[in-house]
Amino acid sequence: MKAIILIDNLTKGVLAAEWGLSVYIEHQDHKILLDSGASDRFARNAEALGIDLATVECGILSHAHYDHADGMGAFFERNTEAPFFLRKGSKENCYGKRWIFHKYIGIHRGFLEKYKHRICYVEDGYQIFPGVSLLAHHTEGLETLGMQNHLYIRQNRRYIPDSFAHEQSLILDTEKGLVICSSCSHGGADNIIREVEAAYPKRRIHAMIGGFHLYHTSPEGVRALAARIRSTGIERIYTGHCTGQPAFEILKEELGDQVCQLCTGMEIVV
């Protein structure tokens, strides 16, 4: 498996960066795009890296937030056939709360209708290819995490804490074990690892790639998460985007070389 970070908050060299995430993946002769960042910058970076998005076989949206979804239009302009897989609960209804105000942070309004002929809504456990599947959250009480992170869903004219019914992880089966691509891990990185462990009881979990949504988390909270991650036995962590630099430094202190910083242009080979 090879994964190339097409967009992240950080970059090296001349490649563009933005608050967003997009990952190009080659696995078992298949070409996959996970998320599309917040604009067309991921696509321009792909061109600079010599990656032809027209050859991608499928796109996957990890969750219904703009910084992962709003580049879909740029992808569809460059690729005329590949479907984009969204979890069935994905809608244009995600909000972030600051003070008493709710700000829309969802998929670009109108995209779900405009690109409905390219979008496929899937249930939990959907297998895209052999060794490539999607897994939804199963941990109970995720609404509490939604409220703690000021994330809400607008439903029936009310704002309710997000339970992340629109979020899914990409699971890749490799010779070294399972690789989890979780993008923002709103449900908790440790919870997601345990969910994958329960769903694939006979498989070792090798690595996790994605943001951990820790940029609002206290140092004590990050250290506690690091301990829970360590207890899972996972071998490698590649994290960036919404993890935040202060939290990353704490994870590095706690987990050492087990943790690597994501950045635009980075290549991960398993």
Image (cartoon, rainbow, N blue to C red):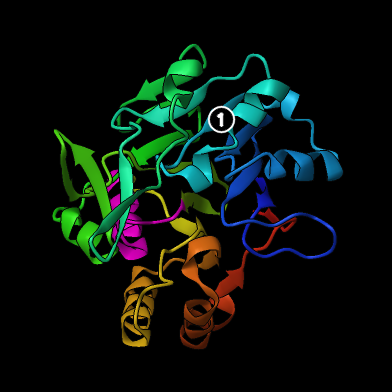
In the foreground, 3 or 156 = 156
Position of 57 with respect to 166 (left or right) is right
Residue 235 position in % (x across, y down): 50, 67
With respect to residue 31, does 148 lie above or below?
below
Residue at figure coordinates x 32%, y 43% from the top left: 94
What residue is pinned by disc 1?
59
Residue 85 position in % (x across, y down): 46, 27
Residue at figure coordinates x 28%, y 32% from the top left: 89
Q: Which residues are magenta?
A: 183-199
Position of 138 with respect to 3 (left or right) is left
Residue 188 visible in the displayed image: yes
In the foreground, 73 or 46 = 73
In the foreground, 231 or 12 = 12
Label 1 SS = strand
Residue at figure coordinates x 52%, y 66% from the top left: 237
- Amino acid bearing label 1: Gly
Asked whether residue 196 is drawn in magenta, I would say yes
Asked whether residue 136 is drawn in magenta, I would say no
Residue 195 position in % (x across, y down): 29, 52
